[in-house]
Structures are given as structure tokens and as C-alpha cells.
Image (spheres, helix red, strand yellow):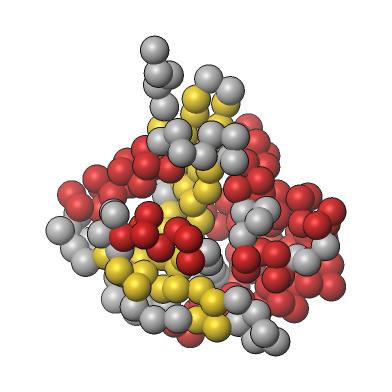
Amino acid sequence: MPFAIDVRPPHKTDIRPLARTLGRAFYDDPVMKWMLSDDRRRTNGLARMFATMTRHHFLGGGGVEVALGSDGIGAAALWDPPGRWKQSPLEELRMMPSFLLAMGAAAGRGRQISELMKQHHPEEPHWYLGVIGSDPTVRGGGFGRALMQSRLDRVDAEHAPAYLESSNPDNIPYYQRFGFEVTGEITLPDGGPKMWPMWRNPR
């Protein structure tokens, strides 16, 4: 019998396992490898980065969800509701020490990515999917789909648009199946990889 996937908002005690799951999910991501090229540092650095983003920004907006299976958190999604995608100065201040610990000398690259993403971000009110990822051990098991469908049901109930950036070209067809379409390209500096802004019209 297939196991059930339970989708729910996280508890505060879920933040660390959620962040570790996302860290494993993005370990081989082209943009994350460009930002944190040291393989050993990337494992812990990504987990710390995602924990910080969740705790100090996404959690307050009510858009975080986790998908649980028999072994705990298999995937997580960090959404911002309309009008909330920009981090406040206070949020940025609170996150800065942990980001510096997570990225070390790579913090400058992290800032470059953030600024480029802001330049391309649409101004029209929308739901923003900042991060979604499944642990490699459960990839293909329906965890990501369960998370996407859970939030997109709400997005559609509100007749709202949605937006994301794909940091991996292999994921573009996946997002297209949910109605997102590529609207451009973001090229990172110094020979870095590309990101693809994707927009989903209201339904």
C-alpha cells in the first residue's frame, strides 16, 4: 500500500529538519554550487541559510508548508503571500549574522543573486514561491506535487497569479505542468549559471 503524504504548516520544532531537507534538495543545484563551491561547506551552509530564511522571513507570512511521509519531512515549500516578497530591513538585519556564518566568503555572491532577483521580480501582487525542494531519497514520490497542489489550490481560490525562479533548467518542464511559463532569463555574473523567472496567470 502506498503511504500517505501529509501536507501541513510547520511547527517551530520542524525548522531544523525542514532546513536540512532543503539543504539536501539543493546540494547539486547549479546556482547553489556556484554560490557555495566548497562541497563540504555547502552541506551545512545551505541548511543554515534555509533555517534562517524560514525563521526570520517566510514563517511570519504563513506560506510555509512541509510534506511528511513515513520518515518525517520529505519536502518543504516556502511561499510569500501577495505583497510580502520583499524582506524588511529588520528581517535582513536579523538574518545577516547567520548568512555570514553560512556562506563565509561566498556571502558576496549571495548578495549578487538576491539583487538580481529583486531587479527581475514583478511588481503586480502575486503569490511567490521562494523555495521548494524534496529530499533526494524521496524525489519522484509525489512530495513536491503534494506541496504545489496544496498552495496552488489556495492561489486559484483567490484568483491570484504566482511567480517563481527556477535555478535548474531540468525543473522548468515540471513547473510548466503546474501552469508556470518562462518569462525571461537571469544570468549570474562571473560566468555563473542562469535562472529562469516563471509566471502563472490567475485562474
Residue 135, given in percent of the width and then of the height, sits at 58, 40
- Residue nearest the observer in this picture, 37 or 94: 37
Query: Taking 166 as reference, is 65 above or below it?
Result: above
- Quadrant of the snapshot with the C terminus: bottom left
Q: Residue placed at 51% from the left, 74% from the top?
A: 195
Q: Quadrant of residue 171?
A: bottom left
Q: Residue placed at 63% from the left, 32% from the top?
A: 13
Q: Residue placed at 78% from the left, 72% from the top?
A: 106
Can you name the residue that lies furthest to the top here?
1
Relative horizontal placement of residue 70, taking residue 30 as reference (left or right): left
Query: Taking 159 as reference, is 201 above or below it?
Result: below
Relative horizontal placement of residue 119, taking residue 176 as reference (left or right): right
Q: Residue placed at 60% from the left, 76% from the top?
A: 193
- Quadrant of the snapshot with the N terminus: top left
- Residue nearest the observer in this picture, 19 or 30: 30
Residue 117, given in percent of the width and then of the height, sits at 51, 77
* Residue 11 appears in the picture as rendered: no
Residue 121, given in percent of the width and then of the height, sits at 42, 78
Relative horizontal placement of residue 154, taking residue 70 as reference (left or right): left
Query: Taking 9 as reference, is 6 above or below it?
Result: above
